[in-house]
Amino acid sequence: MTAKTKVIWLTGAGSGIGKSIAEIFVRKNHNVICCSRDAEKLKRLKTELNDKAGLVDIYKLDVTNHSEISKVYNEIKKGKEIDCLINNAGITSFNLAADDTMEEIRKIIETNLLGSIFTIKTVLPDFIKRKKGTIINILSVVTKKVFTKSSIYSASKHGLLAYTNVLREEVREHNIRIINVIPGATKTPMWSNKVLEKHSDRMITPSDIGKIVFDVFTLETNMVAEEIVLRPIKGDL
Ligand SMILES: NC(=O)c1ccc[n+]([C@@H]2O[C@H](COP(=O)([O-])OP(=O)(O)OC[C@H]3O[C@@H](n4cnc5c(N)ncnc54)[C@H](OP(=O)(O)O)[C@@H]3O)[C@@H](O)[C@H]2O)c1
């Protein structure tokens, strides 16, 4: 690691967009603390990233569990200071509102909305104390357009957008950047094989999202990209 190495805390790192974000930050010599629920997936990721320089830390973490988040954060804090939190962990259902079970509703809100708020609340006191820090949230175009069969997912992403829009105004004075990335349909395991087979040639690739996230993070000026909407050129699915 060099003096220029930044420490990135990334949730949902094991697959899809999170994995691509981990890949680019590690390739550019940053330290990525990769978290998700599946420890085996994280071990495979560390191997795939060929981590000779010790740039990849892995922690099994379920973001719906607030005390687990605090425990992981306290472990991380023993050796390093986090420069950037990336809230990427997320789940969905593709059900009509009438068909979502109470359990599905609770899980989606707890993961996408509360999980992200919990991680933000965890890093915020140190970011405020140090008068710097970046929070990047992976939201979705459901915050820009109505899609059926995504009611709870939409509620969770709109909720995080609203929360972080307010938070941004409260923490500007502390030099904290809040960046909301709003992707359209992206080729990841979140989609069924049937959708991937039919539409994958027009869907966004996770590595393109990774590149954008990296670029906005590394913009070192007094300007911040607060909201970035990314869509397939051919439009939404
Ligand atoms: N794919 C798209 O079209 C699209 C478009 C817009 C936005 N997004 C957003 O992009 C983000 C990443 O999704 P993806 O498309 O890359 O799908 P994905 O491959 O399924 O990735 C989701 C990640 O979240 C992790 N995760 C799920 N629940 C978790 C929990 N409770 N605690 C910690 N980690 C958890 C999963 O790992 P484990 O199962 O190991 O925990 C997985 O690594 C999500 O927030 C999603 O809403 C996706």
Image (cartoon, rainbow, N blue to C red):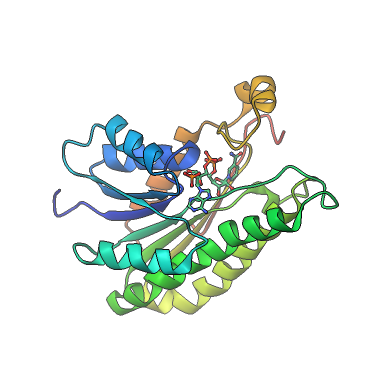
Question: Residue lying farthest left?
Answer: 2
Position above or below: 14 against 181: above
x, y percent for residue 16: 49, 37
x, y percent for residue 205: 52, 31
Quarter in which the C terminus is drawn: top right
107 or 164: which is nearer to us? 107
x, y percent for residue 33: 31, 51
Residue 219 in sight? no
Q: Is residue 94 left or right of residue 135?
A: right
Residue at 57% across / 31% down in the picture? 187
191 or 29: which is nearer to us? 191
Position above or below: 208 against 37: above
36 or 235: which is nearer to us? 36
x, y percent for residue 74: 29, 68
Q: Quadrant of residue 124?
A: bottom left
Q: Quadrant of residue 176?
A: bottom left
Residue at 36% across / 77% down in the picture? 125
Q: How many marks?
A: 0
Position above or below: 168 against 221: below
Q: Is residue 174 left or right of residue 6?
A: right
113 or 174: which is nearer to us? 113
Q: Quadrant of residue 42?
A: top left
Question: Residue lying farthest right?
Answer: 98
Position above or below: 39 against 202: below
Residue at 38% across / 45% down in the picture? 214
